[in-house]
Amino acid sequence: MGGTSTGRMPEVLALIAAASFLLAGCSAPVAPANPTPSDATSPDPEPTASSTPTAAAAEFRMPTACAEVLPASRVAHLESLGMELLAGPDGKYGDAYLADPTPEQQAGGITCIWGEENVPENSVIISVAPLDSGTRGTTIESLVGQGLNERIDGEDFVYERTGDDVAAPAIVNVIGDDSWVSVIEGSGGQDHYEEAVAICDEVSAQVGA
């Protein structure tokens, strides 16, 4: 019995070696020590700030002269209608043109009158005044008391009337948080009212109201 076992030992060892070789060939490959991260595990790129600038809020600047109130194009248009700057800090007659100060002047503002002397219907009165928490309320009360129509334009309150071409001039008052812009035409009617609205818009753009 012992001789037979010894004789088969080389064959058994050969079979074990062959089996070991086959098992080694079927095993999974070994992963590299430092794997390269895939796209799925890559960190997200940092967000970049927008390059679009933010529009700065308008800031009211109280003008000290009528030349600062209107754009040059509007002044040229008024002059083409035979008007000149009669009243205002830099007007032909200065503030002495009016017997009494306007409500806007009493509030610390200026009043400018472009017109044709001795032709009051060919004129336009433009005023700008600063407002605070106290004067804003009293100004609104005064305008409401005049029976003007009220509307809201964005963040502003507007008190106005269209008027007529007989006895009621077109009037537009724009009340902002800290500003008051008013335009009184020498005559009324739809055309003069629309011009007063346009002039208010131009003045507001000029002074940041």
Image (tube, rainbow, N blue to C red):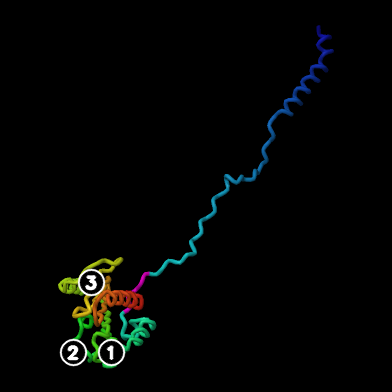
Instruction: For mark 2, give the secondary structure.
Output: loop
Marks 3,1: beta carbons within 8 A: no
Give the quadrant of residue 76: bottom left
For disc 2, the neighbor class at 10 Å (few under 14, some 14 to 19, many from 20) is few
Residue sitting at x 41%, y 68%: 55
Amino acid type at image mark 3: Tyr
User: Which residues make up the magenta segment?
Assistant: 57-61
Q: Amino acid at mark 1?
A: Glu
Left or right of 69: which side holds 16? right
**Residue under label 2:** 99
Please check the rendered image and state whether residue 47 is part of the magenta-colored stretch, yes or no.
no
Mark 1 — residue? 116
Q: Residue at x 19, y 72 (%)?
A: 148
C-beta proximity under 8 Å, tags 3 and 2: no
Q: Which residue is mark 3?
A: 159
Give percent across and percent down for residue 207. 34, 78
52 or 103, which lies in front?
A: 103
Q: Tag 3's secondary structure? A: strand
Residue 140 percent location from the top left of the image: 20, 71
Whole-angstrom CA distance, mark 3 to mark 2, is: 25 Å
User: Which residue occupies 81% across, 9% down?
Assistant: 2
Quadrant in the picture for residue 7: top right
- What kind of secondary structure does the magenta stretch mostly adopt? loop
Q: CA distance from mark 1 to mark 2?
A: 18 Å
Of labels 1 and 2, earlier in sequence is 2
**Residue 190 vertical position relative to residue 35 in the rendered view, above or below:** below
Nearest to viewer (mark 3 / mark 1):
1
